[in-house]
Image (tube, rainbow, N blue to C red):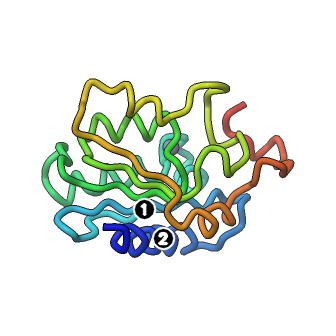
Amino acid sequence: MKDDDQNFMREALKVATSEGSDPATSPIGCVIVMHGQIVAAERNRVDHDHDATAHAEISAIRAAGHASGNADLRGAVLYSTLQPCGMCMMASIWAKVGRVVYGAGRGDVHRIYFEDRHIDTLDFIRDAYRDDISVAGGVLRDDCAALYYRPWDHPPKSEQGNI
Ligand SMILES: [Zn+2]
């Protein structure tokens, strides 16, 4: 399972960096795997689509639903290069994915990637009514974290979508 996780995270990294790896472009990638096959692979498209909800995970959940003809993605594994934000973690719960796997975690990156000062989005999984969803982080952590502003960086205010 661990080998699979790394392989699929490498695919998420490929999608994330398909248009470059400048942190200013928020190169976040997500793949969704069902029955061992990638059914969706999406990059962050917020700026491209002029859509604040066009996070990689949201786009991938939409694409996986279209691909499978079902909004219920039970049994699917969602891989994201960055710990999903609140919107995307909640969407994962609603989409009924079985497992969320991420690379860089909240502590590895600048606060601009999260919307809440204190609530860790992992708490959404821990506190969910569903008990058939799990989460694992830190897969290819260093490769993933290298794509983003780090805690000690000073990204320009214009790039801080959470303020
Ligand atoms: Zn998100």
Disc 2 + disc 1, Cβ < 8 Å: yes
Q: Secondary structure at mark 1?
A: strand
Q: Is residue 108 left or right of residue 100?
A: right
Image quadrant holding the C terminus, namely: top right
Q: Quadrant of residue 31?
A: bottom left
- Label count reads 2
Residue in the picture at 61% in, 70% down: 143
Residue 17, horizontal then vertical, whole percent:
58, 72
The residue that label 1 is drawn on is: 42
Q: Quadrant of the N terminus?
A: bottom left
Tell me: is circle 1 under 8 Å from ligand 1: no
Residue sticking out furthest to the front: 2
Residue at image position (46%, 30%) is 123
Q: Which residue is mark 2?
A: 15
Q: Quadrant of residue 91?
A: top left
Residue 93 is situated, as x and y percent measured from the top left of the image, at 31, 36
* Position of 103 relative to 52 (above/below): below
Amino acid type indicated by mark 1: Glu
As drawn, 82 above or below 13 = above
Q: For the point 52% across and 40% down, which residue is it?
A: 85
